[in-house]
Image (tube, rainbow, N blue to C red):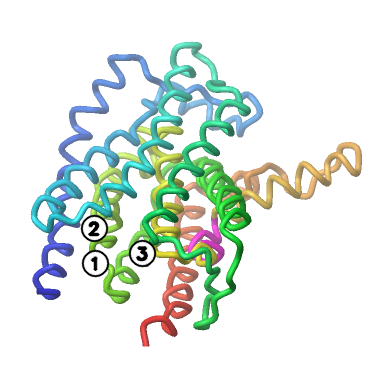
Amino acid sequence: MLNTRLILLLAMIPVCFVIALILGKFIIPMLRALKAGQSIREVGPKWHNSKAGTPAMGGIIFICASFIGILIMTLIWQRWTSVFVFLFALVFGLIGFSDDFLKVKKKQNEGLKSGQKFALQLIASALYLFILYQRDVMSCELWIPFTTLRWQIHPIIYIFFAMFVIVGTVNAVNLTDGIDGLATGVTMPVMVFFLLTAVLLKKTELAIFPAALFGALGGFLCYNFHPAKTFMGDTGSLFLGGAVCGLAFALDMPLILILVGIVYIVETLSVMMQVSYFKLTHGKRIFKMTPIHHHFEMCDWSEVKIWIVFVSVSVLFCALAFYAVQPLIR
């Protein structure tokens, strides 16, 4: 039975890849027709101005492709766990879609106010965590990577901690989406990690979502790699953040995000360090521009070189994360 499921999981990857390729052929022209072009930040790199007008909200492609794959597998297995995690990610995708829609409507790079986004993300996180807790999926025991140790935390404290982790991670993924294909490429090895971990922990129903999303992201990357024919927008980046967090908490291992999400964390820390140092020194900077991928752009790194280096780092740390979960598998 397990071998059959593994074969179906592996088969779903190319299926979702092809579905994303096909959807892209229809969705990208539709976004162009709707004039859903990306507005470029005035404070961003000047050479990004050439990207103005590239269709945004392309994240719809891999969201739909992964959903089709999940639905097919769910109907075969009659296990709905991955659908539940997908719906959690979808809520964040809808928040991002609202943001993107307002940007398109206003023809500027500002959509929802930060307070509005923050409040919606907190509500979505709290609801998801409460359901996980009620269904005994989330233990409120903080597993320490590389060990079998678990630290028992009071449920209320744990849920507040988890809400902070989810909102922080989701917005960190959003920051990573700054150059062609970066968030897509960095997240693909993260999905491989969750796929393998779910299978080895015998939680195969949770492997459906990462397998489908990995394939869908591969198809989307064909349109999103430099030079991008479409951007995922907040629709896609917030969905990806929700997917990463949703899987981590569904597998009851939130601290693994430190390893699999290392690129997201570094991107966020670079912004925090820059802002803090700027205020403390009254105008001095640590980096030429943040998030840090823009710093490397200002150092004359090509977008392709940045993509290769950042994705390689993600692969390396996801491999380390896989080693970190081995004590749970033995």
Going from N to C along the chain, the mark reached first, 2 or 3, is 3
Q: How many numbered discs, if any?
A: 3
Bin the neighbour count of mark 3 within 10 Å (Cα to Cα): few under 14, some 14-19, many 20 and up: many
Label 1, on which residue?
204
The amino acid sitting under disc 1 is Thr
Please tell me whether residue 168 is drawn above or below residue 248 in the rendered image. above
Q: Nearer the viewer, residue 80 or 59?
A: 80
Q: Position of residue 138 (x, y in %)?
A: 44, 61
Label 3, on which residue?
194
As drawn, is 130 to the left or to the right of 220? right
The amino acid sitting under disc 3 is Phe
Q: Residue at x 13, y 68 (%)?
A: 5
The magenta stretch is 257-263
Q: Residue at x 29, y 43 (%)?
A: 220
Disc 2 is placed on an element classified as helix
Label 2, on which residue?
208
Instruction: Find out whether residue 177 is within the magenta segment.
Output: no
